[in-house]
Each structure stands twice: as C-alpha cells, then as structure tokens.
Image (cartoon, rainbow, N blue to C red):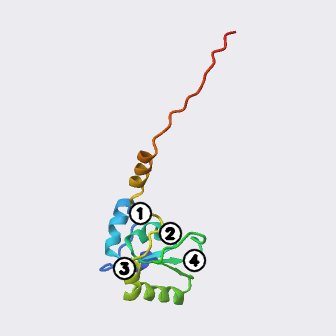
Amino acid sequence: MITEYVETHKYKAVAFKSLGQLRYLSALQFVDFVIGNSSSGMTEVPAFCIPTINIGDRQKGRINCESVINSDNSLEGIKKSITFALDKHFRDKIQRQEQLYGNGTAAEKILKIIKEHPIIPLKKSFYNIDY
C-alpha cells in the first residue's frame, strides 16, 4: 500500500525501510504530523511538539503527551485525527505541552544532587583468619 502510493505520487512522497535515528529525528522538522503505531510517536516526537496520530491499541498503557491523538484504524477515524492534527488551535496548544519524558536537563540535575550530598566513605572491618 505504501509502495503503491509512493509510486503514484513520486513528486511528493518517498518511502524508506529505515532512516536511522539521526536522519529520522532530523526529518521531523519537515513533517506536519507523524502517523502510525510506533513507540517513537509516543516518546521522541512529542519532544518536538509535533502531533502524533497513534493508530490502534499497540501502545495502549503508555502515558500520552497532549500531542498524541489516539485513533482507531477506521478510515473515518484516521481522517478525523488528521484534521485534528492540522488544526491551528491544537498545534498552538501543544507548543506549551508538558514534556512527560523530561526536558533534557536530567544530567545537570543528577550532578547537582551528587555535589550537594557528598559520599560518606564506608568503614568496614575485616578480620584475617589464620588456619
């Protein structure tokens, strides 16, 4: 289905088996939304404040950012989700969404805690037993 679409829309569509992480994340700057049922749409994509249309229940049980739109796999449900993902009000709203997986400052926070709480050296007693 995807290959067929790309073949008939070569001027605006391209398919890759895999882009790799760096190319994939770099390509996000060119998309209006991400659609599918991949965990990437639930974790990485929201960090860029880009809508994700999550189709089906494969990701059921995961926490969702505001930018994740859950859809059933019906044509009508998917069309409705695409319309919602492109809505200006929705897109403006998700620019201010809470980042559920952090804001990129975890290392600094961990270092601060380590510096504020010096490690207490352990004193262990050892006994040599002669036989």
- Which of marks 1 and 3 precedes in the sequence? 1
According to the picture, the residue beneath numbered tag 1 turns out to be: 18
Could you tell me the amino acid type at mark 3? Asp
Residue 73 place in picture, x, y as percent: 56, 82
Could you tell me the amino acid type at mark 4? Gly
Which numbered mark, 1 or 4, is in the foreground of this view?
A: 4
According to the picture, the residue beneath numbered tag 3 turns out to be: 32
User: Are the residues at dot 1 and dot 4 in contact (C-beta closer than 8 Å)?
Assistant: no
Disc 1, SS? loop
Out of 92 and 13, give the one closest to the viewer. Answer: 92
Regarding residue 83, the answer to whether it shows in the image is yes
Out of 56 and 66, give the one closest to the viewer. Answer: 66
Q: In the picture, which quadrant includes the C terminus?
A: top right
Residue 113 place in picture, x, y as percent: 44, 50
According to the picture, the residue beneath numbered tag 4 turns out to be: 56
Does residue 18 sit above or below 131 in this rendering?
below
Could you tell me the amino acid type at mark 2? Ser
According to the picture, the residue beneath numbered tag 2 turns out to be: 38
Could you tell me the amino acid type at mark 1? Ser
Disc 2, SS? loop
Q: CA distance from mark 4 to mark 2?
A: 10 Å
Image-quadrant location for residue 48? bottom left
User: Are the residues at dot 3 and dot 1 in contact (C-beta closer than 8 Å)?
Assistant: no
Q: CA distance from mark 2 to mark 3?
A: 17 Å
Out of 10 and 109, give the one closest to the viewer. Answer: 109
Out of 74 and 115, give the one closest to the viewer. Answer: 115
Q: CA distance from mark 1 to mark 2?
A: 13 Å
**Residue at x 46%, y 45% (from the top left corner):** 117
